[in-house]
Amino acid sequence: MHLYLCRPHWVTDPDHLARCHDLLDEEEKARHARFKFERDARLFLVSHALVRTALSDFAADVSVHPAAWRFETNAYGRPRIMQEDGAPGMHFSLTHTHGLAACVVASNADVGVDAEAESRNLDTATLAPRIMSPSELARFQSASAAVQRKQFLSLWTLKEAFTKARGLGLNLPVEKLSFFVNGHTIHFGCPAEVEDKPGSWEFRLMQPTPEHYLSLVTRFVRETTPALQSKWYVPLVGERTTEQSPALLASTHPTRGVATSSPS
Ligand SMILES: CC(C)(COP(=O)(O)OP(=O)(O)OC[C@H]1O[C@@H](n2cnc3c(N)ncnc32)[C@H](O)[C@@H]1OP(=O)(O)O)[C@@H](O)C(=O)NCCC(=O)NCCS
């Protein structure tokens, strides 16, 4: 399982951007053309080029060109690889936010990733009662303002990542998911009608940069969980080994960690 991370400001050269654009399919190009602001258009372009180049990097043994991947979406908008594309059992999830794009790719696993920038303007006091379980809300309301911000972004990204792994979008009642980040350990519970095997999911909470929170969730079809490897990665250029590896803040299995080829 690999986590590919990219800073959109690394891709600004017009020729590089044009080559990334060439990788997109017609639907992606049409979506890209609809953005009003250059910054948003570039984030979309870099993110989708990241997905395509990450999939080809991960599945190097099947030699699929980044432009050749084809996707379909479920009823709630979750994209997945068309199975006839020669990479059976491969799943991915994408997130993009101001200053960061991230894509997780895994074999034989349900995966979800979500990232948020610390600077994002969120009305946490109004949103907290809507997205938190009673125990989460009690902890949140008794915390200091600085801790509340961190708690909120942690819970938000954990819940969004789980929603994305399940592919149910707004149909999943996130206020019924209950997380407790206790030191380096994440505890997760929810009613059986939402998820009957909460223990089969593995969660990680990370800080890939000082300004970003990122949550990653996986559920493997096989018994053994493969290690997570993270890479800072530039579409059509390759791995960028000079960057710091993401800090792992907490996990359901804190001893597993994150392997990386970047300096830590
Ligand atoms: C659709 C949703 C998952 C997108 O998340 P987001 O934080 O707005 O945006 P992100 O950048 O993290 O993710 C966007 C990517 O997720 C993927 N995606 C879209 N719908 C998805 C779905 N139903 N399931 C999984 N992945 C989905 C796409 O790859 C999309 O990229 P694209 O728009 O460039 O094609 C999210 O808005 C949603 O429906 N959330 C519902 C849960 C909720 O109520 N959350 C509140 C806070 S806990």
Image (tube, helix red, strand yellow):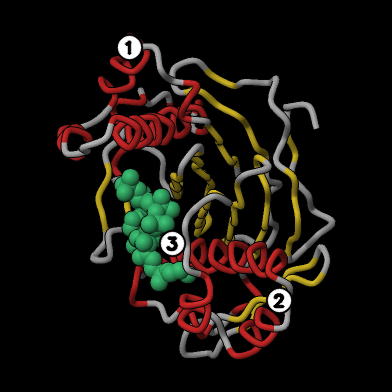
Residue under label 3: 164
Q: Position of residue 209 (x, y in %)?
A: 65, 40
Residue 41 lies, with reference to residue 252, above or below; the image says: above
Q: Position of residue 39 (x, y in %)?
A: 35, 32
Q: Residue at x 25, y 50 (%)?
A: 72
Q: Which residue position holds label 2?
A: 180
Q: Which image quadrant: the C terminus? A: top right
Q: Between tags 1 and 3, which lies in front?
A: 1
Residues marked 1 and 2 touching at CB (< 8 Å)? no
Task: Determine whether the residue tagged by mark 1 lies in a helix, strand or loop.
Answer: helix
Q: Label 1, label 2: how many angstroms apart (C-alpha)?
A: 45 Å
Q: Earlier in the sequence, mark 1 or mark 2?
A: 1
In the drawing, does residue 192 fall left or right of residue 87? right
Q: Which residue is located at x 43 percent, y 27 percent?
A: 53
Determine the CA span between mark 1 and mark 3: 32 Å
Query: How far apart in space, not on screen, are marks 2 and 3 (Cα)?
Result: 20 Å
Nearer the camera: disc 2 or disc 3: 2
In the image, is 201 to the left or to the right of 146?
A: left
Q: Where in the figure is residue 207, as x and y percent of width and height?
A: 67, 47
- Looking at this view, is 261 or 177 the one in front? 177
Q: Answer few, some or many: residues within 10 Å of disc 2's Cα (few below 14, many 20 plus, some between 14 and 19).
A: some
- Tag 1 residue: 14
* Dot 1 amino acid type: Pro
> Residue 42: image x %, image y %?
34, 30
Comparing 252 with 55, the one in front is 252
